[in-house]
């Protein structure tokens, strides 16, 4: 398996909802990433997990909570989001670090109403 | 932190012509430079990358050049085809436990028939 998969593809949630985004890879990669991408902008790094430990948090608001249950899975828990959080959320993985080839999943299109 | 500038923001070429996209980076310690292609509604796809110990790398119609002294790198696409139409992002990264990709602002390439 040479792909990063993400579920769901689309998500609409209200500002009081709690939801989770899921990401999975079976390439044996030990670094996993969450990015946020707004229209016509580059991906914006949110979190980096290295060997299942959080190594970078780019000052992301606490309404976004990452979790790495094992080396293949990455979750992003969402709670009390704002409409401006609507975006494409991309997961990525790389063999060890960000100086290895990084592969992106298809993303979850999130709309906060 | 690292800052990556990318030019031009939009580029239109005739089918069969060449396209060149240029990026500059600020941190001389950066040593990994990938290029991503993102079609509308799709994930960013790694198309080519170069490391700081190499000056040029080629893969069929795509090539990347790196000038470490000037701190700039470029993507060259020859014999452009309509399927090359997409947004292209350059990025830079530094080896280290907290390494992360810093993206350029993107170039929208349109190949006209």
Image (cartoon, coloured by chain):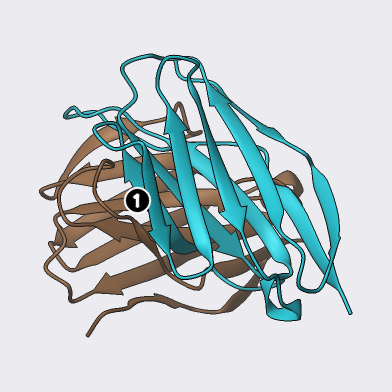
Q: Name the residue under label 1.
A: A33
Q: Position of residue A7 (x, y in %)?
A: 44, 78
**What residue is at 44 percent from the left and 61 percent from the top?**
B46
Query: In the image, A17: left or right of A95?
Result: right
For mark 1, give the secondary structure.
strand
Can residue B47 be seen in the rendering of this structure? yes
Give above or below for A104 relative to B2: below
Q: Nearer the viewer, residue A99 or A69?
A: A99
Q: Which of A40 and A82 is in front in this view?
A: A40
Around disc 1, counting alpha carbons within 10 Å, would you say few (fewer than 14), some (14 to 19), or many (20 or more)? many
Color used for chain B?
A: cyan
Color used for chain A?
A: brown
Q: Where is residue A13 in the image (x, y as percent from the top left)?
A: 65, 66
* Image quadrant in which the C terminus of chain A is located: bottom right
**What residue is at 18 percent from the left and 27 percent from the top?**
B96
Can residue A80 be seen in the rendering of this structure? no
Q: Nearer the viewer, residue B48 or B100?
A: B48
Q: Which chain does the numbered disc 1 sit on? A: A
């Amino acid at each position: 398996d040479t792909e990063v998969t993400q579920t769901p593809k689309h998500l609409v949630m209200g500002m009081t909802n709690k939801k989770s985004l899921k990401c999975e890879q079976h390439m044996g990669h030990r670094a996993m990433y969450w990015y946020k991408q707004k229209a016509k902008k580059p991906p914006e790094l949110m979190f980096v997990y290295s060997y299942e430990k959080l190594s970078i948090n780019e000052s992301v608001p606490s309404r976004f909570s990452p979790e790495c249950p094992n080396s293949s899975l990455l979750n992003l828990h969402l709670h009390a989001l704002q409409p401006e959080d609507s975006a494409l959320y991309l997961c990525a993985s790389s063999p060890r670090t960000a100086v290895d080839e990084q592969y992106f999943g298809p993303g979850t299109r999130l709309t906060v109403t | 932190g690292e800052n990556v500038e990318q030019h031009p923001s939009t580029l239109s070429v005739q089918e069969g012509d060449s396209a060149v996209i240029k990026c500059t980076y600020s941190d001389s310690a950066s040593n990994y430079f990938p290029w991503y292609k993102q079609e509308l509604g799709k994930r960013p796809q790694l198309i080519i990358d170069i490391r700081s110990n190499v000056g040029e790398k080629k893969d069929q119609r795509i090539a990347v050049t790196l000038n470490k002294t000037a701190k700039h790198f470029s993507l060259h696409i020859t014999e452009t085809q309509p399927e090359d139409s997409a947004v292209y992002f350059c990025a830079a990264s530094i080896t280290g436990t907290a390494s992360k990709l810093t993206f350029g602002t993107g170039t929208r390439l349109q190949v006209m028939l």
